[in-house]
Image (cartoon, grey):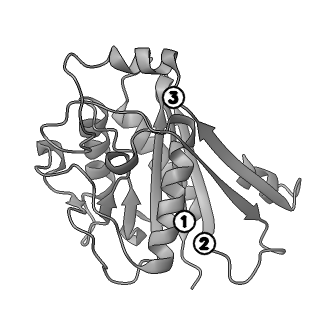
Amino acid sequence: MAQDLLELDEADVVIAAGADAMTESMLAMIGRFATTRTTQVRPFDRDRTGVLLGEGAAAVVLVGERAAPRPALARLLSCGLSCDASHETIPDEGGIVRAMNEAFARGRRAPADVDLVVAHGTGTALNDPTEALALERVFGECATRPLITAIKGAIGHTSGAAALMSVDVGIRCLAGGVVPAIVGLAHPLSEGAGLRFATDVTSPAPLRLAQINAFGFGGVNAVSLLEATA
């Protein structure tokens, strides 16, 4: 929405923010999705047992091209959105792929341009294999596949703040050239056998383009492309 407001000249500067805190109702709902107790979030691990909640807040300031400060932290190229509404909680691979493809189309980029993916990576039974298969569909033909990291193993699922938390990490990766490892990932799940997961803190070749995945209940999918400015 912030990007749309800027592109339509309805605003010069927009603040996008998200915040969330644990509540009894959220804890009760999350507890219904697993039959065993979860002691650690393990994104994309074959032995993952479910998600744990976190708390936090994040905000970004988006400025139009004409008024953008120099240098900006990063450039938001595009956001791809889809809402497949196929199930209340089960993610849909096709809907995720549509959001990725829309981001590429709006940003005039191709999958081969992506250097880093900050994945949604909830460590749950259904989300991780679905996201992995969607990533394989989109990046499977690339000569060099992007590095993939995820942050929920380190900070938990921060719900309404989760997407912007990942945006923050993506910006830091582009600026610093260092990609954090996926905390909790020891043995990648079979659906991700062909993907490049960050299992150690790494400093790859210069990062120019980062993709941020964020998914929600009801099949709401958002994929953002961030470009380095330096």
Q: Are marks 1 and 2 in contact (CB under 8 Å)?
A: yes
Q: Position of residue 170 (x, y in %)?
A: 48, 64
Instruction: Tell me if residue 87 can be seen.
Output: no
Residue on which disc 3 sits: 22
Q: CA distance from mark 1 to mark 3?
A: 29 Å
Determine whether 114 is above or below 79 in the image.
below
Sequence-wise, the earlier of marks 3 and 2 is 3
Label 2, secondary structure: give it.
loop
Residue type of the residue flagged with mark 1: Leu
Q: Position of residue 93 (x, y in %)?
A: 34, 35
Sequence-wise, the earlier of marks 1 and 2 is 2
Q: Residues within 10 Å of mark 2 (few under 14, many from 20)?
A: many
Q: Are marks 3 and 2 in contact (CB under 8 Å)?
A: no
Label 1, secondary structure: give it.
strand
The residue mark sitting in front, 3 or 2, is: 3
Relative horizontal placement of residue 84, taking residue 38 as reference (left or right): right
Q: Nearer the viewer, residue 98 or 51?
A: 51
Q: Nearer the viewer, residue 103 or 162?
A: 162
Relative horizontal placement of residue 45, taking residue 6 as reference (left or right): left
The residue mark sitting in front, 1 or 3, is: 3
Determine whether 147 is above or below 134 in the image.
below
Q: Residue at x 25, y 62 (%)?
A: 141
Q: Position of residue 215 (x, y in %)?
A: 46, 37
Residue type of the residue flagged with mark 3: Met
Q: Residues within 10 Å of mark 3 (few under 14, many from 20)?
A: few
Residue type of the residue flagged with mark 2: Ala
Q: Which mark is residue 226?
A: 1
Q: Residue at x 35, y 53 (%)?
A: 150
Q: CA distance from mark 3 to mark 2?
A: 30 Å
Label 3, secondary structure: give it.
loop
Q: Residue at x 12, y 37 (%)?
A: 47
Residue on which disc 2 sits: 74
